[in-house]
Image (tube, grey):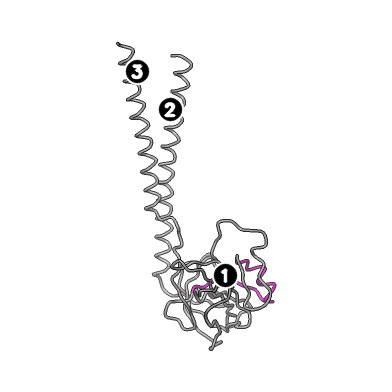
Amino acid sequence: MSIKSWLAFLGFGSTLGLLLFLGFWQLNRAEEKQALIKIRLEREQGPVLRLDKNFLDGDNLRDHKVVVSGVYDAQHQFLLDNQIIAGRIGVYVMTPLRITGSSRAVLVNRGWVPISGRRRVESNIGIDELHVKLVGSVKNFPAVGYKLDGAEIPTPGWPSMIQVVDEVRLSKILGYELLPYQLLLSADAKQGFDRRWPESYPMSPEKHIGYAVQWFLLAFTLVVLVIWRSKKSDRKAGE
């Protein structure tokens, strides 16, 4: 076999191996997502837990529904910017809730409100009832694909606009400790706004499987093309 033929064979083998690797990798990602979704659903459908001074561990609470009593810090609200719903840009209204019997607080995401072209909130985000007992779901703070320098720094004044939630920085500004997760206010709770929360996993297991099928089809196509080219060369050599 000539050097040219060896190089062609190595190129074919490497490309085929890469395509198969990517296909199986996507299948593994689909299995991982299915396992995570199963755990999330089990927690969401489980009993409502009590969030109090003795039970604040986020790793054990995430995705669970919890009931909590406390006092809203209505004077120090944060607006999480660049949140899009139904093609409109807006903000999430995040209000600190100082937990009864504890020195700590949790950011309650009261939902989405639109903002105007001048970056002004179009809704009244004031709070009528400060002492509340509410139900919500424990979730991680919204993630961003690319974090710009200074994105975690709140704007001056209240309510304060933020691009990224950094609970450590916000705790220093507030003067009391915020828990490292948010509480999504339940749909039937009062003093909330649009609560069409985005999916926790932007890429579903079905999408991963779809990508896997595409990689396997490319691998199959590559094999067919190589076989066809080989037979064509053999016919020419026999003429």
The residue depicted at 62 percent of the width and 72 percent of the height is 161
138 or 48: nearer the eye? 138
Instruction: Name which of mark 3 and mark 1 comes first in the sequence.
Output: 1
Circle 3: element type: helix
> Is 168 colored magenta in this rendering?
yes
Q: From the viewer's perspective, is residue 216 above or below residue 203?
A: above
Residue ID for mark 3: 233
Query: For the magenta stretch, what is the residue range?
Result: 164-184
Instruction: Name which of mark 2 and mark 3 comes first in the sequence.
Output: 2
Q: From the viewer's perspective, is residue 72 above or below residue 163?
A: below
Q: Quadrant of the C terminus?
A: top left
Residue ID for mark 2: 12
Instruction: Tell me the kind of residue under disc 3.
Output: Ser
Residue 112: percent from left, percent from top: 50, 73
Instruction: Name which of mark 1 and mark 2 comes first in the sequence.
Output: 2
Residue 17: percent from left, percent from top: 43, 33
Circle 1: element type: strand
Residue 188: percent from left, percent from top: 42, 80
232 or 126: nearer the eye? 232
